[in-house]
Each structure stands twice: as C-alpha cells, then as structure tokens.
C-alpha cells in the first residue's frame, strides 16, 4: 500500500502557517509544462497556472536555462550599481510595450504602488494639482494587490475589513460604466487605474468600446490611464496585452506574474518618459527590483512573446475551451466569460459551491481555483495542448453531471 505523504504535509502547513490562504489539499513536489505531480505521485493538469504567473508552463526550458546561466554569473547587485542584464531588459520590455521607459519592481502589488506614487507625483509636478489633493479613479470589484493602500480602494470585504485606517484619495465607480467614470473625474484626478479584464472578480470583460472610451476621456481631461495587466497581460488573452484587443495604449502598464516566467518574482511599470521621468534618484526604490536574475529571466520571457506563438496559442486553444464551456451553460453552468485562455465560469449554486467543484476537479486530476462563491477561474498555461484542454473540459463536464 502506497504511503500517504499528503496528509502529514498538509497538517504541518496548517500547524506552522498563518492562515492567509485556504489551499486545496494538494502538495506539489514536481512540475513540468502544464502538469504537476504531488508527493504521492498523483499527476494533475494545472488549469490555474499560478494566477497567470505560469503562462509559459512550469519549468519552461528557455526560462530555466536563463536562470541557470545567470546563477553562475551574478544574482544580486542592488540598484547601487548597474549590471549587464539591466539596460537590455528595460529596453526590450519598453519596446514590447511600444513605449519609452521601464521601472522594474518585484511583485504586482509593488508595481501598483509604484504606479500610484508616480501618478500622484505626475499630477503635482505636471498637471498642477494642489499638494495633497490628488485623486485616482478605480473600479468596483478591482483586485490590484493587498497592501494597505491598495485594500483602501478594494470593494471586497475579505480583502479590506479590519485593515484600516484607509488611505484616502481614491474614487470607486462601477466597472464598465463610462458615465460614472466620467462623473468621477475632475481637476484633482491624476489617473484612472483599471484592469482591462478583472481577474479576481471572475474574469469580467468590459463592454465593447469601453477601454477606447476610457482612453479618449483620459486624453481629453489630461488624466493618466493606468492599465493593470498583471494577470491579463503577456499573452494570456490571445494578444500581448488585453488592451491590444481594442487598440488601446495606456500611459502606464503595470506588469507582473508571467514576467517572471514562474521562476522569480518580477514586475514593472512601463510607460511614457514624461510620466516615469518625474521620479528622481532617492524618491522611490527597491533593493531587489531589476536584479540580475529577474532581468535575465524577464528578457527570456520577452523573447518568447516576440515570436507571437504564445499569443496565437491562447487565441486558438481559448476558442476550443470557450466552445466546450458555452455548451455547458444550462447544464450546470449559468454563465461563461473570458478571452483567450482565460475564463470565469459561474456554477449553478444549487448544484455545488466553487470550492467543492475545485475539490471534485482535483479528484479527477485537474487543478482550478474558485472565487466569490460559485465562480471558477480557468487559466491553463499557454503551453497546454488541444487534447489537454479537452481533458480538462471532460473533467468539468463530469463534475457537473455528478453534482
């Protein structure tokens, strides 16, 4: 009889970890491509991909090779000095974004904080907003991270409750509501900060024409359009950025997750020189931001994206996934949303909760993650095959039929 290694590993984690997550009882020991293997040798198809941090799958050979090569050279210098990967990474990422400058950070939340600070400073120095009065407009249902400033403008009670006092200076409007956004913008507004597709909220896609209208409004009112593409960017939606689907170029991109290739945490704010140029030495920084390992892996990620292969895979395989999901509406699913290889699906709450659905999917060898009750997010790695997409859809169909 095979020894059970999962149970003691789960118990140890429960005993010695602060409970800020409620993970499924799956203890991963190895991974490659779209598959992970647990401590007991069970294999699972990963349809979460680290919330899009693993767009290129687990241990992509090009990304692992870049990390290994850099490990043998230099891993950290701090920003007190330059290193030979820094300039090329900043240039190549700015070129991918079709803009001027890159400001490297580590995590998505750190990049959002950076964009907030830059937007405020730009507002005071360039727009002439009176000191201390800058406002930023955000959307209901947003998820931009978990720092105290960011949760100050969250509308999710779990993320926000009991962490006050909250940072002022943010106005919250309904997502996708252009009239409400327009009404919230005034002479103190320095930025509109939006996810082009809201991931944590359930992969909510805004109405057609919304993003171009936001871009036009920001241009007209001399307000920065800041696009948080931490989850939606870098190939996930079938284009390099979710904004690309409607021909929109924001003033600042906020990037993370997939930028580190699933190897190291890498994030960045990328944008116009007249905006990022408001920062002077000493005003903002990060010891690990733009470190040699991060830049080496980030450059390899950019190289993968410049071929267009992964964006095409997301479009083509996303269409396969969407066709199967749409066929399940009325047979266990009440709604399907998404773009590319990214979907939010609502399970009929009379059948089972999202958590229970994920548990049953794991029993069938597929990993996914629930959010907000009976909603599931599906975001398999872009290296997944058509047969593997069908396998995941068959598993979901089986869970719904057996509910």
Image (cartoon, rainbow, N blue to C red):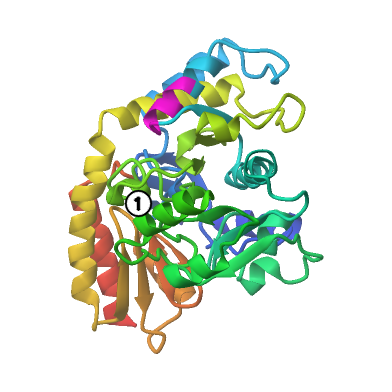
SS type, badge 1: loop
Pointer 1 residue:
380
Specify few, some or many for label 1: CA neighbours under 10 Å numbering under 14, 14-19, or 20 or more. many
Quadrant assignment, res 382: top left
For image coordinates 69% across by 20% down, the residue present is: 79
Residue 236 left/right relative to 169: left
Task: Choose between 232 and 53: the one closer to the eye.
Answer: 232
Q: Is residue 402 above or below residue 34?
A: below
Task: Choose between 382 and 96: the one closer to the eye.
Answer: 96
Give the overall secondary structure of the magenta segment: helix
Give how far across and how far down residue 3 sits, in percent: 52, 53
Q: Say whether residue 144 is magenta.
A: no
Q: How many marks?
A: 1
For image coordinates 25% across by 34% down, the residue present is: 308
Dividing the image into 4 quarters, which one contains the C terminus? bottom left
Residue 183 left/right relative to 62: right
Give how far across and how far down residue 206 sits, in percent: 37, 64
**Residue situated furthest right in the rendering:** 165
For image coordinates 67% across by 46% down, the residue present is: 120
Give how far across and how far down residue 60 sits, in percent: 38, 31
Residue 251 visible = yes
Quadrant assignment, res 349: bottom left
Q: Is residue 141 above or below residue 353?
A: above
Magenta part of the protein: which range? 91-98
For image coordinates 36% across by 44% down, the residue present is: 241
Residue 7 left/right relative to 214: right
Residue 64 visible = no
Give how far across and how far down residue 50 sits, in percent: 47, 49
């Amino acid at each position: 009889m095979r020894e059970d290694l999962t149970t003691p590993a789960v118990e140890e984690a429960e005993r010695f970890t602060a409970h800020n997550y409620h993970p499924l009882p799956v203890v991963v020991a190895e991974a490659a491509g779209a598959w992970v293997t647990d401590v007991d040798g069970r294999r699972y198809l990963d349809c979460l991909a680290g919330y899009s941090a693993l767009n290129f799958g687990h241990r992509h050979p090009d990304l692992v090779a870049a990390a290994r090569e850099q490990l043998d050279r230099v891993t950290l210098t701090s920003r007190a000095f330059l290193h030979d990967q820094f300039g090329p990474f900043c240039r190549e990422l700015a070129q991918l974004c079709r803009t001027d400058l890159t400001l490297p950070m580590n995590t998505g939340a750190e990049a959002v904080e950076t964009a907030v600070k830059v937007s405020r400073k730009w507002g005071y120095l360039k727009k002439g907003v009176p000191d201390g009065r800058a406002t930023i407009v955000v959307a209901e249902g947003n998820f931009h991270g978990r720092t105290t400033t960011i949760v100050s403008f969250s509308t999710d009670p779990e993320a926000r409750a009991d962490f006050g006092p909250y940072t002022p200076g943010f106005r919250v409007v309904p997502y996708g509501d252009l009239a409400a956004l327009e009404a919230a913008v005034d002479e103190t507004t320095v930025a509109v900060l939006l996810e082009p597709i809201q991931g944590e909220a359930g992969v909510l896609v805004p109405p057609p024409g919304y993003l171009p209208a936001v871009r036009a409004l920001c241009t007209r009112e001399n307000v920065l359009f800041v696009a948080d593409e931490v989850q939606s960017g870098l190939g996930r939606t079938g284009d390099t950025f979710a904004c690309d689907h409607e021909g929109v170029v924001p003033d600042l991109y906020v990037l993370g997750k997939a930028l580190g290739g699933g190897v190291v945490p890498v994030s960045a704010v990328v944008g116009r020189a007249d905006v990022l140029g408001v920062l002077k030495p000493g005003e903002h920084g990060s010891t690990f931001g733009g470190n040699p390992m991060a830049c080496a892996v980030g450059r390899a990620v950019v190289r993968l994206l410049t071929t267009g292969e992964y964006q095409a895979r997301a479009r083509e395989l996303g269409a396969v996934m969407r066709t199967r999901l749409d066929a399940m509406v009325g047979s266990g699913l009440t709604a399907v949303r998404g773009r590319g290889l990214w979907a939010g699906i609502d399970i009929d709450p009379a059948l089972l909760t999202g958590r229970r659905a994920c548990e049953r999917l794991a029993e069938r060898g597929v990993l996914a993650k629930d959010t907000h009750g009976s909603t599931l997010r599906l975001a398999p790695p872009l290296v997944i095959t058509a047969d593997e997409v069908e396998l995941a859809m068959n598993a979901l169909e089986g869970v719904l039929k057996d509910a």
